[in-house]
Image (spheres, grey):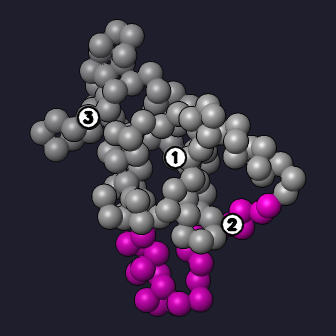
Amino acid sequence: MAAWNVQQYDVYKKSGKLFGKEISTQNEFPVIFYHYHYLRFLDGDRIELGRRVLRERVLQLIYAPYLKELEAAKEKIQSIDSSFDSHGTARNGMTWKAPVLYIYRKAIGVYNIYPRAKFLNA
């Protein structure tokens, strides 16, 4: 699974394991891999998850556990070297395109920039 095809599945937990169900066929399967394509850490403690439609269940069952693990690794690294930016934080540069892209992405439901706390407190 990945952000570009997760829309065709329902995801859920069963007996503590992550499963998917293909919407068109109702075939169930264990989720064994997710490609976190386009996940970016932005300044201002924000995270961007790309330009795909991501349902709340996907955010909570797939992204939140992964981001919590990344945060734990970051804290461990920073306890050794506080100057190390383990996420490679990118600036969210403002250009003339930014307002247009914001409106477009909000209108089609793919504005996937969230405060990091959304996932760490989940």
Q: In terms of secondary structure, where does tag 2 sit? A: loop
Q: Are marks 2 and 3 in contact (CB under 8 Å)?
A: no
User: Quick one: label 3, few (<14), some, or many (20+) residues within 10 Å?
Assistant: some
Q: Which residue is mark 3?
A: 12
CA separation, marks 2 and 3? 32 Å
Q: Are marks 2 and 1 in contact (CB under 8 Å)?
A: no
Going by the numbered disc 1, the residue's amino acid type is Tyr
Q: Is residue 27 left or right of residue 4?
A: left
Question: At 58% across and 83% down in the image, what residue appears?
Answer: 84
Ranked by sequence position, the earlier of labels 2 and 1 is 1
Magenta span includes 4: no
Give the percent coordinates (x, y) of residue 7.
Answer: 47, 27
Q: Which residue is mark 2?
A: 90
Q: Which residue is mark 1?
A: 36
Quadrant where the C terminus sits is bottom left
- Nearer the observer: mark 1 or 3; the answer is 3
Give the residues drawn in magenta, as a range: 71-94
Is 64 located above or below residue 24 in the figure?
below
Q: In which quadrant of the rendered view does residue 16 lie?
A: top left
User: Quick one: label 1, few (<14), some, or many (20+) residues within 10 Å?
Assistant: some
Quadrant where the N terminus sits is top left
Going by the numbered disc 2, the residue's amino acid type is Ala
Question: At 42% across and 66% down in the image, what residue appears?
Answer: 117
Q: In which quadrant of the rendered view does residue 107 lie?
A: top right
Is 33 located above or below residue 98 in the figure?
above
Going by the numbered disc 3, the residue's amino acid type is Tyr
Ranked by sequence position, the earlier of labels 2 and 3 is 3
CA separation, marks 1 and 3? 18 Å
